[in-house]
Amino acid sequence: MKNRSQIKQRFVTPLLGISLLGFLASAQAGQLTWHPVNPNFGGSPLNGSQLLSNAQAQSRHKSPSSSGYKQRSALDRFTDSLESRLLSQLLTGVGDGKTGSLSTDDFLVAIEEIDGVLQVVVTDLATDETTIIEVNGLISD
């Protein structure tokens, strides 16, 4: 009697080959379709966190906390807000012919009327650079 391994070798190997040929013969080609990955362009919303984590891993930008950025104090924010409000109020009066000036740590703004021409003079105190803006026809006599 023949050894079992010889029988398996003799019958199983050709059967595997025949079944593989039958499988390949039944395979059919289909049309290739593309599906977007990014949820912004119609891809699955479940891909969003993976795309974000990949982008953050590749990013070379440092977060503000590690770059030495310091949160501004409440007093600094209040001072900026007050300066902005006063400058806005000063410039609102320009249409009525009102003049005046505003001085801050960074700049000096002076609004004055010279011979019917309204002049806005802005001086940068850090560089002493001066910009003059002249407006005609705003002051009514």
Image (spheres, grey):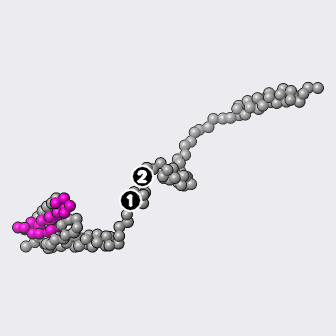
Image check: 63 left or right of 84?
Answer: right
Image check: 137 left or right of 48?
Answer: left
Amino acid identity at mark 2:
His
Q: Is residue 65 above or below residue 61?
A: below
How far apart are the alpha carbons under marks 1 and 2? 13 Å
The residue lying furthest to the left in this view is: 115
| Residue 95 in view | no
Which residue is painted at 37% across and 63% down in the image? 70
**Quadrant in the picture for the C terminus:** bottom left
Residue in the foreground of this view, choosing between 34 and 98 = 98
Q: Decide which of tag 1 and tag 2 comes sooner along the chain.
A: 2
Which residue is painted at 54% across and 43% down in the image? 34
* Residue at mark 2: 61
Element type at mark 2: loop
In terms of secondary structure, what is the magenta stretch mainly?
A: strand
Q: Position of residue 104 (x, y in %)?
A: 22, 69
Mark 2, residues whose alpha carbon is within 10 Å: few (<14), some, or many (≥20)?
few
Image check: 52 left or right of 121?
Answer: right
Residues drawn in magenta: 109-128
Task: Inspect the magenta stretch and tell me whether residue 96 lies in it.
Answer: no
Q: Which mark is residue 68?
A: 1
Q: Which quarter of the figure has residue 109? A: bottom left
